[in-house]
């Protein structure tokens, strides 16, 4: 009987030791995998006090020039303070004093207001290049800020032609007095 109890205790102790061994082994393997993924994909942001040397600055300037990137500050200098400019969706309506207006851009290059009336003076309102920004942040919308007019514009892309939309709108009835 003692032999059976000793055998059972041995099996129990052996299984606990084996469990602890494999637990540590697989935790270590999992941590190594996590660390390698963090190293590959989760590059930490540089410290705020990181100082770029001349080589880093030159590389950044080359990348900016190659991809035609414009920083917000340099963009303001190039376009002037009164010209409208594209903003990210996160920036839309973040300035309390600015009015938010929704516009629609149809496939036949017609920009309309909320009443489907064509927008006059597109260059002064949202700028002539807004349509080239569809797909930069979102496929079917572009956001433009006009500091002069204190407006943020949400421009939604409509795949229909403006002429098709006009056909579906009821004709206003004129009342003669």
Image (cartoon, rainbow, N blue to C red):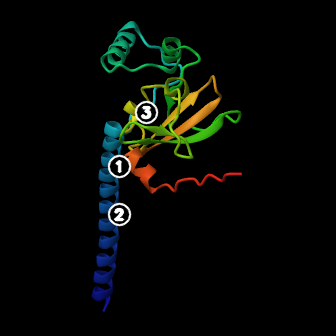
**Label ID, residue 44:** 3
Quick check: can you spot residue 71?
yes
Mark with earlier residue (3, 1): 1
Q: Position of residue 19 (x, y in %)?
A: 32, 67
Q: Nearer the viewer, residue 159 or 143?
A: 159
Question: Disc 1 designates what residue?
Answer: 31
Q: Is 47 situated above or below 168?
A: above
Q: Quadrant of residue 102?
A: top right
Front tag of 2 and 3? 3
Q: On the image, numbered disc 2 is attached to which residue? A: 20
Q: Pick whichever of labels 2 and 3 is earlier in the sequence.
A: 2
Q: In front here: 2 or 22?
A: 22
Nearest the viewer among 108 and 8 is 108
Q: Secondary structure at mark 1?
A: helix
Q: CA distance from mark 3 to mark 1?
A: 18 Å
Badge 2: residue crowd in 10 Å (few <14, some 14–19, many ≥20): few
> Residue sitting at 44 percent across and 25 percent down?
128
Do the CB atoms of the residues marked 3 and 1 lie less than 8 Å apart? Answer: no
Residue sitting at 37 percent across and 13 percent down?
Answer: 61
Q: Label 2 to label 1, Cα distance in Å?
A: 16 Å
């Amino acid at each position: 009987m003692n032999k059976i109890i000793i055998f059972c205790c041995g099996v129990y102790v052996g299984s606990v030791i084996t469990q602890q061994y494999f637990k540590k082994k697989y935790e270590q393997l999992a941590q190594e995998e996590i660390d390698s993924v963090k190293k590959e994909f989760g590059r930490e942001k540089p410290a705020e006090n990181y100082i770029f040397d001349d080589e880093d600055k030159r590389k950044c300037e080359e990348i900016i020039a190659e991809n035609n990137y414009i920083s917000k500050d340099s963009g303001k200098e190039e376009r002037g303070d009164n010209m409208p400019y594209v903003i990210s969706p996160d920036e839309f309506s973040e300035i309390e004093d600015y009015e938010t207006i929704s516009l629609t851009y149809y496939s036949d290059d017609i920009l309309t207001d909320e009443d489907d009336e064509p927008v006059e003076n597109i260059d002064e309102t949202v700028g002539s290049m807004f349509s080239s920004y569809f797909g930069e942040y979102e496929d079917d919308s572009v956001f433009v800020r006009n500091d002069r007019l204190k407006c943020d514009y949400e421009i939604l892309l409509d795949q229909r032609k403006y002429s098709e939309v006009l056909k579906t709108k009821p004709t206003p009835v004129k009342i003669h007095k």
